[in-house]
Structures are given as C-alpha cells and as structure tokens.
Image (tube, rainbow, N blue to C red):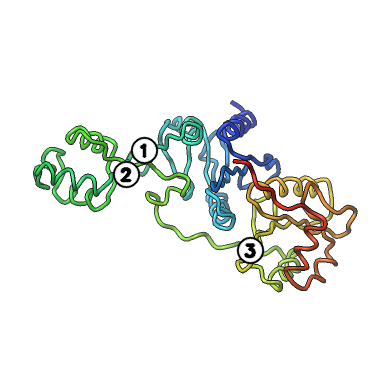
Amino acid sequence: MSRSALVGNVTAMLEDAGFLVSDRCAIRPKSFDIAARRGEDVLLVKILGNIDAFDARTGAEMRRLGTYLNATPIVVGLRTRDEELKPGVVYFRNGVPVLSPDTALDLFVEEVPPLIYAAPGGLYVNIDSEVLADIREEKEWSLGKLAKELGVSRRTVSKYEDGMDASVEVAAELEELFDAPLTSPVSVLDGAEEIRDEEPTPEDPDVAPEDEPIATVFTRIGFEVHPTNRAPFKTVNENAKRREQVLTGHSAFTEAAEKRARIMSSVGQVTKTRSVYVVDELTRESVDGTALIEKSEMEEIRDADDLRDLIMERGEEPQEDAA
C-alpha cells in the first residue's frame, strides 16, 4: 500500500469514528500528517508504512506540540524493518504511542482499547494490582503459593501487587488460575503515560533569526512563544491568562506560503486555535480563515486585544465541531 493510500484510509477511519479531521499536511518537513478531534480528544497523527522512519527529532516535536495544543501524538504504521505490527498491541517510538491500522480501528471505531504493549523483552500487559491482591487474599493464597504456581519468586509476585506489569504469558496464567479478568487497557488517548517511561517535554528549539521580530511582539503582548522545526507553522504562541493559542507563519506571500496558511487554518479548526500568517507585503487579508498581517503592522501591535481584533477582522473564529 502506498503511503498516500494509507493516509487516506486512516483519515476515512477517523471520520467514520466521528472525528473532525484536518487537511493533510502535504508539506516538508512535517512532524504530523493530520490533526483530528472528537469531543475533547485531540490527536496529532503521523502515518508511516515503516515506523522505523520515525526519528527522534520528529518524536520530540510531536510531543512538544501535543503539550502546547492539548493533543495526543500518535503514529499509525504498518511494520518495522523486521515484522508487521501486531493487532491489539501498542508500540512506542521516541516516546510516542504507535498503533497498527487494525489497532486504531478497534480503538477509535469499535471503542475497544488495546491491552498489550511492546517493550524491550517482549509483550506486556497492565495488571490491576489491587484486584490481584484482593483475589489472592480471598482465595487465601500466600505469596509463596502463587509464586510457586507461576514459577516465579515471591518478590516478583509482590511487585505485581505493587503495580509492576506482567508478560502476556504470566497475565494469561494469572487469569486462568483465578478465573477472573486482571488486566486493564492501555490509555492511548492519555499518551499511554501509565506504561511509557516518564520523560519531560523536550526543550523548544531556538527561534529562527528571521522570526525573532515576530516572536518579540508576541512576547511583549503576553504570549509564551514555542518555535517549531517541522510543523506547517513557525510557532505556537500561548497566552495562559486568556487561555488562547495562536499558530503563526512568516514569509513572503508565495504559493508555498498560501499552502501553509490553508493548512494552518485547517489544523486550527481542529485544535480550536487561531492562525496568523505574517507577510512582507499584504496583497489580501486572509487565506481560508488564517489572517494575513503585514510585518510592519505586526510590529505596531501593542497588546493582545489589538492582535485579537485584527485576527477577527481578517480571519475567522475557530469553529466548534459537532462531535
């Protein structure tokens, strides 16, 4: 299957599941392919045939964007260099959850979350430690008896009851011994934080020299500026006090700039953010809801209200989706 066909299939699947899906980010470089929203759940999705192509730099950017846009970064892919991705299993690359199309279909359309995740050493599941401890005590089994049945040490059983996850084989044996479900699903929409290693959000890259005057304006009027490396926009700007975010682009107004502005508008509709494209010379006022502002106008903005008024005059408000 070509990558273009795979992107189309994943987009159609998310739409069938009730998501509002952005236009494809058909530009390079790009950290994600589409953004999607259903209710309060927002996804930034990278779609790949071979997930080994998902590098650390892209993973770091997607995790940063997920933090700034209150979204879950995920990768949907078909295979690694060595094998096809297994259905019902969550993989990880550079701190981002990875699903096969079948696993994504089960999660988003059938609303059946995965139970298994891949980690060094094999496949694992979340054990509900409290349920395990309660059932063992109800059956009056000692740690030693359960350890003997499983062929592990008492210390290992104690770790299971303290929250350590178990291999698929051990989990299946536990459920057979106690004739009860003991596993809990992987919370993909929360970034699978309960099983992946706790890692801080990667640091922002530096602002590009040509974008520093724009970043200075945003900082002056109360925004925190987060530069990007591989997104269709140059910065995500957050105003925590006003609880608003603005996606920003900046360049001469070329055909490529117009394309970026359209993508920014589409992503903004999904993430409920405004978008602004700063141009050297103004020839029109907006592109599909992305406000165009001349650089000289931008430098004259004195506060957040001025910026908002200009955006509302030239652009459009992010719309609420029906999902």
Query: From the viewer's perspective, is 88 left or right of 287?
Result: left
Residue of label 3: 238
| Dot 2 alpha-carbon crowd within 10 angstroms: few under 14, some 14 to 19, many 20 or more | many
Q: Measure how far apart labels 3 and 2 are at the Cα level.
A: 35 Å
Q: Are marks 1 and 3 in contact (CB under 8 Å)?
A: no
Question: Which SS class for mark 1?
Answer: loop
Circle 3: residue type: Glu
The structure residue drawn at horizontal position 14% and vertical position 39%, both measured from the top left corner, is: 151
Circle 1: residue type: Leu
Eyeballing the image, is 252 above or below 178? Answer: below
Residue of label 2: 126
Query: From the viewer's perspective, is 288 left or right of 12?
Result: right
Upstream in sequence: badge 1 or badge 3: 1
The structure residue drawn at horizontal position 37% and vertical position 43%, both measured from the top left corner, is: 119
Circle 2: residue type: Asn
Eyeballing the image, is 131 above or below 205? Answer: above
Q: Measure how far apart labels 1 and 3 are at the Cα level.
A: 35 Å
Residue of label 1: 115
| Dot 3 alpha-carbon crowd within 10 angstroms: few under 14, some 14 to 19, many 20 or more | many
Q: Nearer the viewer, residue 57 or 102?
A: 102
